Amino acid sequence: MTMQSSVLPPGLHPETYAVREAVARSQYGEHGEALYLTSSFVQDDCESAARRFAKEEPGYTYTRTANPTVDSFERRLAAMEGTECAVATATGMAALLLVALTTLKAGDHVVASQSMFGSTMKLLGTEMARFGVETTFVPQTDVAAWQAAVRPHTRLLFAETPTNPLTDLCDIRALADIAHDAGALLAVDNSFASPVLQRPVEFGADLVVHSGTKLIDGQGRVMAGAVCGTEKLVDGVMGTFLRSGGLNLSPFNAWVVLKGLETLALRVKAESAAALELAGWLEGRHGVARVHYPGLASHPQHQLAMRQQSGMGGTVLAFDVVGKTPGQLRANAFHVVDSTRVCSITANLGDVKTTITHPASTSHGRLTEEQRQAAGVGQGLIRISCGLEHLDDLKADLARGLDTLQ
Ligand SMILES: *Cc1c(COP(=O)(O)O)cnc(C)c1O
């Protein structure tokens, strides 16, 4: 919850807000934003404490209710997304839970993509189902299927674009129109693109959700999340729930991601440029069957990506290695991943260190072979989240395994 109005003039560019938007400096005039690592705030006297608790005057009382460092992060992210406000949460999943618990009630219906982040599918499909909320999962890229799934009680369309690991896109404008015609909201998980590449509200989305753990931190340090949107819905409804529900981001983690936002544009642009070059280098190379990257002309939604993602493909790419049987595909993919010496074999992404994973045995490991086939995640698939290492070192790292494939 924001306590102060901005000290900046209005109408500045996102790049300027990324390094400047924050609460006012303290009486010490610190240049780097202060980290208010405190659980409560001391009041001058009983009368002013009473007024603050009654919200008759602005002022901090208790960090679960509001904290200046958390406020700074929320304001900076909202300015970058072009939304009225944002609320910060402990993790990306806490942000998704907050959206679900504040926009849905028993009897409501959700339409979501069948290739969303695994925990999001579990949250909507399993956990929320226990509270009488039903979700229909549809193919990510099939706009007609989203439309056909809408029912009289549909309250929320939930999209994630581009997806992990296959980089399939949603047409945000088309989904916003479907949602609004049905009297529903469109929420977009923007963790993979970040506001640097894609500002979903410009295409009609009502809510923007983030895992700040990924690109916003960008250096693999902390977990964080956020929801961005209107004052009424995000600060009003969601902020009120968050303050009672305790889904808060800690001030320390808020400070880390606040500083992460300052370099977000530089990192995302450099990592996207690296991903594009690596994807082009992989395409047609010995041992590679197919490359999935929205920045390549071979991607089925290349045109949409260029329109919706500021002309860039993003920082994540995936590719299938060659092989005939599932067993051979898996062995070949393991060989390529295990032959790397620079890339990290780890599930995180959006880090300045390049990460490499085998989705079929990790993030998508608990799916049945049929579900995996439906999601297009075969045993030969490898996902790469590009970091900032020298490209020649990354190419050599991948060539080591690819060149020695049987
Ligand atoms: C990681 C991720 C999440 C969940 O975020 P956490 O910070 O891990 O809770 C949600 N959506 C997407 C697209 C993600 O990549």
Image (cartoon, helix red, strand yellow):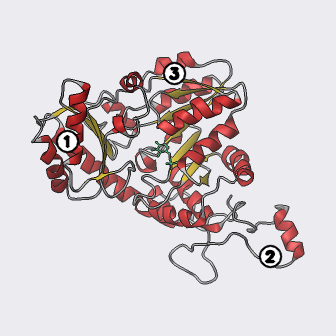
Asked if the residue under mark 3 is in contact with the one under mark 2, i.e. CB atoms within 8 Å, the reply is: no
170 left or right, relative to 53: left
Task: Give the residue number, with chain letter if any, for mark 2.
Answer: 43
Instruction: Looking at the image, tell me whether mark 2 or mark 3 is earlier in sequence order.
Output: 2
For the residue carrying disc 2, how many other residues have a C-alpha within 10 Å: few (<14), some (14-19), or many (20+)?
A: some
Kind of residue at disc 2? Gln
Task: Give the residue number, with chain letter if any, for mark 3.
Answer: 146
The vertical placement of 254 against 298, above or below, is below
CA–CA distance in space, label 3 to label 1: 39 Å
**Image mark count:** 3
Kind of residue at disc 3? Trp
Near-viewer residue (236 or 13): 236
Tell me, yes or no, if residue 16 can be seen here: no
Q: Nearer the viewer, mark 2 or mark 1?
A: 1
Q: Position of residue 58 (x, y in %)?
A: 76, 66
CA–CA distance in space, label 2 to label 3: 52 Å
Kind of residue at disc 1? His
Instruction: Looking at the image, tell me whether mark 3 or mark 1 is earlier in sequence order.
Output: 3
258 left or right, relative to 375: right
For the residue carrying disc 1, how many other residues have a C-alpha within 10 Å: few (<14), some (14-19), or many (20+)?
A: some
Q: Position of residue 373 (x, y in %)?
A: 36, 23
336 left or right, relative to 84: left
